[in-house]
Image (cartoon, rainbow, N blue to C red):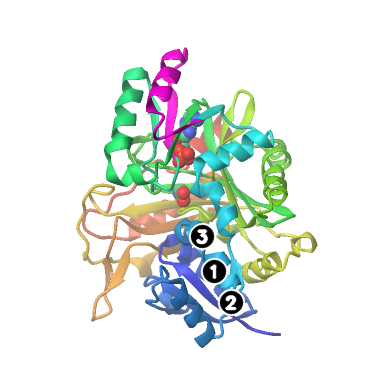
Amino acid sequence: MEKRNVLLIGGGGREHAIARSLSRSPLLGKLFITPGNPGTADLGENSDLDTDEFDDVVDFCETHHIDLVVVGPEQPLVEGITDYLHDYGINVFGPSKGAAMLEGSKSYAKSIMHKYAIPTAGSEVFDRHEISKLETYLQEQGQFPIVIKVDGLAAGKGVFICENIARAREYIDLIMNDVNLSAAAPTIVVEEFMQGEEVSVFAISDGTTARYLMHAQDHKRIGDGDTGLNTGGMGAYAPAPVLTDAMKQDVMERIIQPTIDAMAAEGTPYTGILYAGLMITGEGPKVVEYNCRFGDPEAQVILPALNSDLLELMITTVNGKLEYQSLDLAPDYFCTVVMASAGYPGTYTSGLPVRGLEHVPEGVQVFHSGTQRNKEGELLTRGGRVLSVVGRGSTLQQAIDAAYEGVERIEFEGAYYRKDIGAKGLRYFNS
Ligand code: AMP
Ligand code: GLY
């Protein structure tokens, strides 16, 4: 069997989960991760390659005989790393720059959805020089809340739910004057507010065929009961019972496959992971947003459910042969609880000793996000989200209990975690 060398880009819990699945493949030769983290260091070789410099990535791939580059985060995809490496004959798992615009530009994503009748909220797009037109539009709105979004990547900070017109004006001012937001806002998208429960559907596509991978629910807010500030994600569970099997089928037929078909028709076929953030509204599932990669922490509950060989699946996808590959998914439930530094998502201290990983019960998986090792090899904190602890069970309750049993064995000063991960899902079994 021909072994393949892989370069994995990223350094969070998501990439630790990807690295663990890749490392189980009999097809894997050498695995390099850049920048990686202390978790991925146990599975392959971490590198400090600067992935902003695509030329350096090409050199690295040539030197280390890399057969496949796997891109974890959205930024390099939106900036076109896939196209750049392709020009040098390097295989990349992840969409092209044109296809990654589904995440990189909200106005582009909305235009595709409207053009191809993919269910989503109604929307209007305004150029940043058309603020007076936007003001007139707001005055004509009978219905609040409305949602205002900046067009480009804004690390989760570019969406504003406006209860009334005064709020909308305030947010528009903020967008126009904040340097970070302003850069992401060549255009502003104004969208209808959708009421409902959110769920994320993950599919894999080779540009033509799409296969369902899993659906999960994230917990974006810092506080229990979905209160407080937005974060990168404080926990997730899968599969989320809010989406029934019948709805899942419907999402594949009316949202995922039409999106893949639309991108092919536009001349920018979509290859890689398509992550559709959905709202389950009274009129059925509608798209809130697309992402062009695995979620973090959703990957930590999706990948452990995949019995199929991830590396083989990625190679098949890159070769456009997904049609011939079936997926084997475990029937279990998975829950991940993120342990964060005190103060996150605001300011926090790093460099605090992390203890107890060796006491985590068997079957509970721990993925590193913001950790580091000092010269003595001790594990320390190094970021907001420090670890994600994953439990598995034949019921959602068992998966939740297993994750929290793991969390209780791990210690670092001020460790913070939500106590209600998965609770939303349990309601479907208790009623
Ligand atoms: P996005 O970055 O587009 O996913 O938006 C971030 C969050 O804002 C989503 O996860 C939703 O909770 C919320 N959101 C975005 N768009 C809408 C909408 N049209 N209606 C209701 N909530 C929304
Ligand atoms: N957990 C949300 C994301 O990865 O975008």
In the picture shown, does residue 45 fall above or below 53? below
Q: Which dot marks residue 364?
A: none
How far, Cα to Cα, is label 1 from label 2?
7 Å
Residue 26 painted magenta: no
Judge whether residue 106 can be spotted in this image: yes
Q: Residue at x 60, y 53 (%)?
A: 99
Asked where in the image residue 182 lies, by quadrant, the reply is top left
Q: Is residue 136 magenta?
A: yes
What amino acid type should be assigned to the residue bearing mark 1?
Answer: Tyr
Q: Are marks 1 and 2 in contact (CB under 8 Å)?
A: yes
* CB atoms of marks 3 and 2 within 8 Å: no
The disc at residue 88 is 2
The picture places residue 33, in percent across and down from the top left corner, at 45, 74
Q: Earlier in the sequence, mark 3 or mark 1?
A: 3
Residue identifier under label 1: 84
Left or right, 177 with reference to 69: left
Describe the element under mark 2 as helix, strand or loop. Answer: loop
Q: Earlier in the sequence, mark 3 or mark 2?
A: 3
Residue in the picture at 34% in, 43% down = 181
Q: Quadrant of residue 170?
A: top left
Q: Label 3's element?
A: helix
The part of the chain drawn in magenta is: 125-150
Q: Amino acid at mark 2?
A: Tyr
Q: Which residue is mark 3?
A: 77
* Nearest to the observer: residue 322 or residue 24: 322
SS for dot 1: helix
Q: Residue at left 50%, top 45%? A: 105
Residue 157 is situated, as x and y percent measured from the top left of the image, at: 36, 42
- The amino acid on which the numbered mark 3 sits, given as a three-letter code, is Leu
Q: Residues within 10 Å of mark 2 (few under 14, many from 20)?
A: few
Query: In the rendered view of the protein, which quadrant contains the N terminus?
Result: bottom right
